[in-house]
Image (cartoon, rainbow, N blue to C red):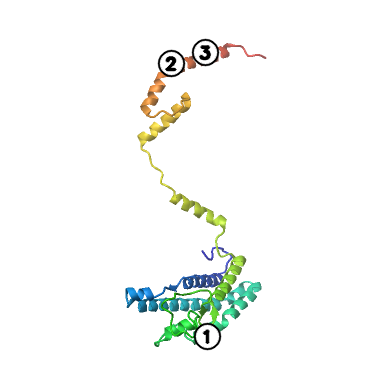
Amino acid sequence: MIGASPDCPPGIVLLADHLDATLTVGEDLLAQALPPRADLEEADPASAPEAFEAFIGRMVRLESGLVLRVLQARRHAAELGRADPSMKAAANLFRAQTGLMAELAVERGALGGGLERPGDAHAWLRSRGLIAPEAAAPSPFEAVAASDDLKVAGLIRLGDLLDAVAALLDLIDARFGLYPSEMELEPEAAAAEAAASPEVVQMGEGEAAAEVVSSADGAALGAAEPVASAAEAGSALRADAPAATSLVRRLDAAEADSAERPTGG
């Protein structure tokens, strides 16, 4: 959870949120893949074009979201210098690393997708490095998958962009503290563990009384095993009553004899 530290300024929390969201969208981009479509064409001729269009649509939406998050992070990066002058150089470096991409992404319509004419999808794949520059279309016998080499907005490697974002986020976390510490997480972890543990079976009053009597009887009489029921416990106590009475009488006699003796001094 970002912003757990009370020392972290609100503007820095907002910047960190955009950086963290950028990493999340980047991971979603890296998870996208289009399987070979030769088998799909054999199974259902209509499914291959639909699979290709769905893949392109997901990729374009995720790239647009990624660029938008980077633009928002760039806008809030100035908060770093105001919160801590020593962080101003890091903010300027991040803005420099993403400056050209941000400008041309807006100019080229990367936020809107830019797939308006027939053939734009194939041109989009070529510009992002997902297929060879001379390829007219992706091969139906080969998978198309995103990787760190994907060129975001056709300009910057996805891996380089995510590295820059992660580096700035780690620096902010080290300076301001964005995530709860282990000490703060311990009560939550204990509560989660208690919630996940098996429920305790509740005993009725009769069962509880029998358990208490059985335990007391086992401890008092030195039994190898606790008595199984309250009835057996009562029988055992009654059977041992003469010995207990005799012991009490001997103790009373000893106490009376001690009281009758004159004390020295």
Q: Secondary structure at mark 3?
A: helix
Instruction: Check disc 1 and give the amino acid type.
Output: Leu
Q: Quadrant of residue 59?
A: bottom left
* Residue on which disc 1 sits: 104
Q: Earlier in the sequence, mark 3 or mark 2?
A: 2
Instruction: Check disc 2 and give the amino acid type.
Output: Pro
Q: Residue 242's mark?
A: 2
Which one is in front, 255 or 196?
Answer: 196
Residue at 57% across / 79% down in the picture? 98
- Left or right side of 134 for 41: left
Residue 207, relative to residue 9: is it above or below? above
Residue at 35% across / 76% down in the picture? 41
Label 2 crowd (10 A; few <14 / some 14-19 / many >=20): few
**x and y percentages locating residue 225 in the rendered image:** 44, 28
**x and y percentages locating residue 171 in the rendered image:** 61, 69
- Name the front one of labels 3 and 2: 2
Q: Secondary structure at mark 1?
A: helix
Instruction: Check disc 3 and give the amino acid type.
Output: Ala
Label 1 crowd (10 A; few <14 / some 14-19 / many >=20): some
**x and y percentages locating residue 265 in the rendered image:** 67, 14
- Measured in 3D between alpha carbons, the distance from the residue under mark 2 to the one under mark 1, in whole angstroms, is 102 Å
Residue at 63% across / 14% down in the picture? 263
Q: Earlier in the sequence, mark 2 or mark 1?
A: 1
Residue 75, relative to residue 184: is it above or below? below
Q: Residue 253's mark?
A: 3
